[in-house]
């Protein structure tokens, strides 16, 4: 009996050693369950830390550094102009990056063009909708937070302030004008300011909106000029979908003559507009960036690992997965009850109980007047991809200044 037990033990040990040797011999990072692939991440920025848009992205880069410390290598290139995007991405590929995060909103065409050339690199492009257009590459991905949710809630904060100003007699109902500084007449801009206005009108039905385009994403001078033009036209609260602090500065400076409030984007504006900033909203890029990095380390498809609303090689999410956040409500400037109203709307959005683009409104595509929409039927934003699609200027309540 004892001899049998000894022989069996030797057999078990021998088998175990053979399995262990085979596991080492056939080991591959792609097959690894826990993932130990060497990771080198490259970030490409259209600006630098001085601009709120890029600064917001850099905070997610820092979160990646904090999570992995010295386990991965991170490179970044800042202040990349559109015509230099391909060159900057090629340099990062040449440096051995196997994951590249492109934070330039106009870099999509250039970055996708390199995906077929570098199949061993995973390219992740923010704020773009071309991942599923032909050609489709397995290593090219797009992502964006569903920012219309943040815009809507920010609009509620603005609408609460308008209602307070009307009650106090500071403005009349026919003077309840919001102003919006934005870049181009594209869906990202139009969807953003429409969601913002509809949030405001949900608590202040008298609210109307004036828009001024800058024809640039990142121009302090043009943004400030646009903000001043809106203030001169009678707007009492200014918001933005541009990259600098200029509109907030314009509001704070205007308060020397009359108070004009500001609702920000990308970061809190309270440091430059302490008396006039009400609140800001921003996309939280961290969940995607951390998830994409870990997916590449594990050798699995990014969309199989990152949690969100997936459309092929494109992914997005809103408040429900912390991809969108509200930033620092200013108790000094906000109307009473604003925090509670914002929280109620956020919870409704998380539960899927609130459809933003719905109401007794008609809209027209500014680039094609034959393309119209009746919002009584509703419009579901981000249904097809993470980048905004709504592109109709609402009649009677939105005015675009020349």
Image: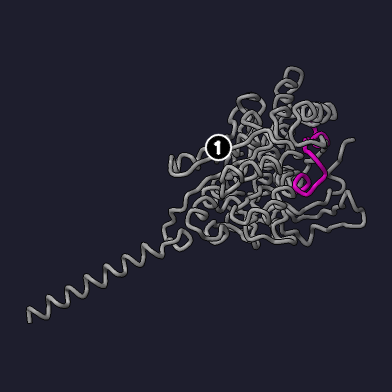
**Viewed as shown, does residue 234 lie left or right of 34?**
right
Answer with left or right where residue 40 lies relative to residue 218.
Answer: left
Task: Identify residue for label 1.
Answer: 59
Check residue 185 for magenta coloring: yes
394 or 321: which is nearer to us? 321
Image coloring type: one colour
Q: Residue at x 23, y 71 (%)?
A: 14
Quadrant holding the C terminus: top right
Residue 198: percent from left, percent from top: 74, 47
* Residue 188 vertical placement versus 338 (above, below): below
Residue 267 occupies quadrant: top right
Q: Position of residue 115 (x, y in %)?
A: 67, 54
- Point 70% across, 40% down: residue: 159
Query: Magenta stretch?
Result: 171-191
Quarter of the image where the N terminus is located:
bottom left
Direction top: furthest residue: 256
Q: Secondary structure at mark 1?
A: helix
Q: Residue furthest right?
A: 370
What percent of the width, then of the height, locates residue 238?
74, 33
| 278 horizontally vs 259: left or right | left
Q: Measuring 56% from the left and 57% from the top, which residue is drawn there?
A: 302
Q: What is the crowding at mark 1: few (fewer than 14 residues within 10 Å), some, or many (at least 20)?
A: some
């Amino acid at each position: 009996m004892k001899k049998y037990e000894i022989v069996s033990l030797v057999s078990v040990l021998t088998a175990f050693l053979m399995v262990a040797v085979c596991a080492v011999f056939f080991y591959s990072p792609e097959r690894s369950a826990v993932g130990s692939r060497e990771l080198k991440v490259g970030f490409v920025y259209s600006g630098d830390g001085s601009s709120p848009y890029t600064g917001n992205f850099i905070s997610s880069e820092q979160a990646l550094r904090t999570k992995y410390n010295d386990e991965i290598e991170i490179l970044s290139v800042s202040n990349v102009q559109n015509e230099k995007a391909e060159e900057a991405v090629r340099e990062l590929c040449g440096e051995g990056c196997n994951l590249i995060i492109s934070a330039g909103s106009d870099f999509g065409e250039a970055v996708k063009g390199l995906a077929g050339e570098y199949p061993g690199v995973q390219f992740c492009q923010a704020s773009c909708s071309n991942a599923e257009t032909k050609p489709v590459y397995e290593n090219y991905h797009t992502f964006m937070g569903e920012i219309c949710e943040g815009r809507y809630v920010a609009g509620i904060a603005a609408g609460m302030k308008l209602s307070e100003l009307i009650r106090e007699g500071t403005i009349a109902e026919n003077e309840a004008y919001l102003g919006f500084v934005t870049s181009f007449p594209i869906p990202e801009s139009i969807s953003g300011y429409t969601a913002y206005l509809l949030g405001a009108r949900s608590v202040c039905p008298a609210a109307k909106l004036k828009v001024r385009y800058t024809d640039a994403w990142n121009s302090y001078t043009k943004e400030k000029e646009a903000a001043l033009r809106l203030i001169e036209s009678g707007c009492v609260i200014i918001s933005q979908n541009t990259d600098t602090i200029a509109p907030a500065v314009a509001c704070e400076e205007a308060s020397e003559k009359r108070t004009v409030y500001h609702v920000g984007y990308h970061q809190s504006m309270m440091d430059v507009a302490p008396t006039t900033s009400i609140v800001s909203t921003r996309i939280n890029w961290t969940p995607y960036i951390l998830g994409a990095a870990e997916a590449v380390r594990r050798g699995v498809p990014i969309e199989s690992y990152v949690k969100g609303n997936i459309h092929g090689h494109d992914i997005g999410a809103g408040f429900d997965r912390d991809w969108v956040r509200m930033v620092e409500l200013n108790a000094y400037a906000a109307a009473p009850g604003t925090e509670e109203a914002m929280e109620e709307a956020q919870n409704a959005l998380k539960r899927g109980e609130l459809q933003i683009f719905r109401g007794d409104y008609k809209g027209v595509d500014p680039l094609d007047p034959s393309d119209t929409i009746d919002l009584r039927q509703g419009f579901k934003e981000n249904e097809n991809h993470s980048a905004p699609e709504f592109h109709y200027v609402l009649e009677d309540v939105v005015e675009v200044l020349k």
